[in-house]
Amino acid sequence: MGIPIYQQIVTQVKERVASGQLHAGSQLPSIRQLASDADSNPNTVAKAFKILERDQVIVSKGFRGTFVQKSATDHLNQNMHSKVDKELQATIQKLKHIGAIDSEIRNSFNAIMKGLSSK
């Protein structure tokens, strides 16, 4: 399985900021334009932009567009996936230590995620 398109976009933007191809204040193409250029779904690009905004690499200024943050280079190493993996691994180890089995952990996780997503 390959790297999801949204993650490829996140990586490419971060690499371009790191290399200086995109600098603070640079305007990014619109979600619609980038989706067209990348031959992908606008929702996929929107997901990438949401992650980049969360990681403080870009900032959306409404109808004026989306721009590279002034402090973007300070935030290029944000990697939520590794943080989540680390936290989940620690929690799973704690649960196994108290005797929980894989299926109990998996079922509880799925139930909690369903509950959170329905709120």
Image (tube, helix red, strand yellow):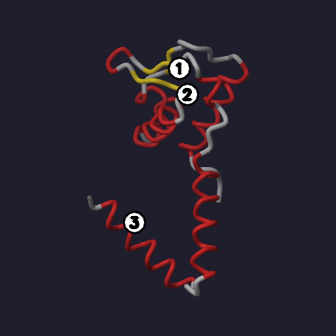
Residue 76: where, in percent of width, then height? 64, 31
Please name the residue that numbered disc 1 is placed on. 69
Between 18 and 44, the residue placed more toward the observer is 18
Q: Amino acid at mark 2?
A: Val
Q: Earlier in the sequence, mark 2 or mark 3?
A: 2
Give SS at disc 3: helix
Please name the residue that numbered disc 3 is placed on. 113
**Badge 1: few (under 14), some or many (20 or more) residues near its Cα, within 10 Å?**
many
Separation of residues labelled 1 and 3 (CA atoms): 32 Å
Q: In this picture, is 108 found above or below 113?
A: below
Side (left or right) of 43 relative to 9: left
Q: Amino acid at mark 3?
A: Met
Residue 45: where, in percent of width, then height? 47, 37
Residue found at x 55% / y 85%: 100
Residue found at x 33% / y 60%: 117
Between 33 and 89, the residue placed more toward the observer is 89
Please name the residue that numbered disc 2 is placed on. 57
Side (left or right) of 19 relative to 86: right
**Badge 2: few (under 14), some or many (20 or more) residues near its Cα, within 10 Å?**
many
Q: Earlier in the sequence, mark 1 or mark 2?
A: 2
Q: Earlier in the sequence, mark 1 or mark 3?
A: 1
In what quadrant of the picture does the N terminus appear? Answer: bottom right
Separation of residues labelled 2 and 3 (CA atoms): 28 Å
Q: Amino acid at mark 1?
A: Gln
Give SS at disc 1: loop
Q: In this picture, is 27 found above or below 105?
A: above
Side (left or right) of 6 relative to 3: left
Residue found at x 26% / y 58%: 119
